[in-house]
């Protein structure tokens, strides 16, 4: 069953592709249903310049907000984490998790 992470942030695919070690997992796209000639068909989504992906709290990148489905990038390394923090300014809000544990 798909898991929702505690935090993710959407970025344009073009920004993520700026990372020198970026390798897209093209075998794991989201499946969309479309009508073609009156028939419903399933097709894999294609990442274009207008596409957005989700950088998850564990530094993987997914095509949806779900933490463990349609993973597009999972080559998490110190260089990738540094790129996320320094270039993308990605930061998981600490107060988000503190508030969650206080109410649980």
Image: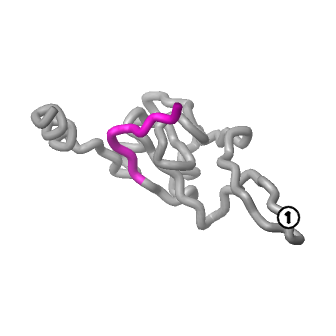
The reply, left or right, for residue 50 in relation to residue 15 is: right
In the displayed structure, 78 sits above or below 38; it is above
Which corner quadrant holds the C terminus? top left
In the rendering, at what x and y percent does residue 73 appear? 58, 38
Confirm whether the magenta stretch covers residue 55.
Answer: no
Q: How is the image coloured?
A: one colour
In the rendering, at what x and y percent does residue 38 appear? 86, 70
User: Which element type, helix, strand or loop, lies under badge 1?
Assistant: strand
Front in this rendered view, residue 66 or 19: 66
Name the residue beneath numbered marker 1.
Answer: 39
Front in this rendered view, residue 96 or 74: 96
Q: Which residues are magenta?
A: 1-9
Most common SS among magenta residues: loop
Front in this rendered view, residue 38 or 89: 38
Q: Residue furthest bottom?
A: 37
Residue 80 in view here: no
Residue 7 in view here: yes
Q: Residue furthest left?
A: 102
Tell me what residue is drawn at x 78 percent, y 53 percent.
42
Near mark 1 (Cα within 10 A), the count class, few <14, some 14-19 or many ≥20, is few
Tell me what residue is drawn at x 73 percent, y 39 percent.
27
In the rendering, at what x and y percent does residue 43 appear? 77, 54
Q: Residue furthest right?
A: 37
């Amino acid at each position: 069953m798909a898991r929702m992470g505690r935090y993710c942030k959407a970025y344009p695919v073009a920004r993520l592709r700026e990372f020198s070690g970026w390798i897209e997992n093209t075998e794991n796209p989201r499946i969309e249903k479309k009508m073609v000639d009156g028939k419903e068909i399933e097709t894999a989504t294609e990442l274009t310049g207008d596409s957005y992906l989700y950088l998850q709290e564990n530094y993987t990148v997914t095509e949806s907000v779900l933490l463990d489905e349609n993973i597009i990038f999972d080559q998490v390394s110190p260089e990738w984490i540094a790129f996320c923090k320094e270039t993308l300014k990605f930061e998981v809000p600490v107060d988000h998790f503190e508030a969650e544990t206080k109410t649980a």
